[in-house]
Amino acid sequence: VQAMDRILFMEDGRISGFDTHEVLYRETVLLMQSKEIDVESGIKLLKRCAQSGYAAAWLYLGQLYSNKKSSLYNPALAFDCYKRAAEMECAEGYYNLGLCYNTGLGCEKNADSAVDCFSQGAKQYDPKCICALGICYEFGIGCQTDYERAVIMYEKAAQNDDAVAINNLGGCYFYGHGVSQDKQSAISLYRRAAELGNSNAECRLGICCELG
C-alpha cells in the first residue's frame, strides 16, 4: 500500500494499517514536506498522533506554529504545543517551552519559568537544555550570575558536541569567567565549535587570528 493511501485510511479512521503512531507521524511529516498532502490534512493527522500520546507530534506542531515565515504562525498555539510536549516529560518540549518563556513567545516573559524548564530538561541530560541553563547562569537570566556553574553546564553539554556550549565555554576561557583565563584554550574551543558549524565561533576565531 502506498504511503498516501495509508494516510487516507487514517483520515477515514481506519488505523489498522499502522503499527504505531510513530509510523503515522513520520509518514505524515514526509508527505507534508513533499507537499503530497495539504497542510490542513497534515495538521489533522499530527494532532491525532499528539493526542494519542506521541510527544514528537506536539513538537512538530509547535515548530509549524512558531515559524514566523509561515502562514500558520501562531505564537499562542506554539506555546500550547510545546507545553503539552513538556507535560509528557519530553526534554525537547522543555527546551522549546523554556525558549518561549525566555522570549515571550505566546506567553508573558518569565525568566524563572524558563530556568525551571531548562532545569527539567537538563535532568534528562539533554545537551540543549544543559547549555541553555549554562547561558542563564552566565548572564543571570532567572537566577544569580554564577560563572562557575555556567562553566560546569557548558562542559557537560560540550561532552555531547553541543556547538553552542563549546563556543560559550571558549568565551569563558577567553575572558576568565569561572575559569582561569586561557586564550589558547579559548581558541581551541572556538575552532572545535566552528568545525561543528557554529557561526559565532567562526567569527570569534577569525578575530583571534587577526589579533594574533
Image (spheres, rainbow, N blue to C red):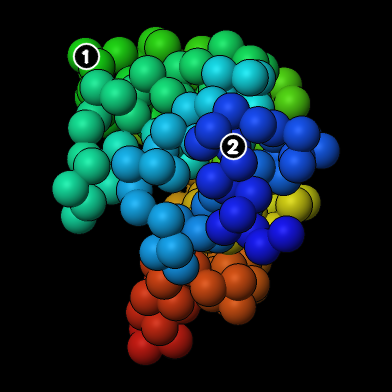
Which residue lies at the image location 51% right of the left edge and 36% below the top edge?
Answer: 11
Q: Does residue 150 appear left or right of residue 122 in this picture?
A: left
- Which quadrant of the view contains residue 107? top left
**For mark 2, what is the residue?**
10
Q: Secondary structure at mark 2?
A: helix
Q: Secondary structure at mark 1?
A: loop
Quadrant showing the N terminus:
bottom right
Q: Does residue 156 appear left or right of residue 3 in this picture?
A: right
**For mark 1, what is the residue?**
108
* Separation of residues labelled 2 and 1 (CA atoms): 37 Å
* Residue kind at label 2, given as amino acid type: Met
Q: Number of labelled discs?
A: 2
Percent of width and height locating residue 153: 64, 36
Q: Is residue 115 above or below residue 180?
A: above
Badge 2: residue crowd in 10 Å (few <14, some 14–19, many ≥20): some
Which residue lies at the image location 20% right of the left edge and 55% below the top edge?
Answer: 69
Q: Does residue 37 appear left or right of residue 196 in this picture?
A: left
Q: Earlier in the sequence, mark 2 or mark 1?
A: 2
Percent of width and height locating residue 197: 53, 73
For the residue pair 138 and 52, the one nearer the viewer reads as 52
* Residue kind at label 1, given as amino acid type: Glu
Which residue lies at the image location 54% right of the left edge and 46% below the top edge?
Answer: 8
Quadrant showing the C terminus:
bottom left
Which residue lies at the image location 53% right of the left edge and 52% below the top edge?
Answer: 29
Q: Is residue 118 visible?
A: no
For the residue pair 131 and 36, the one nearer the viewer reads as 36
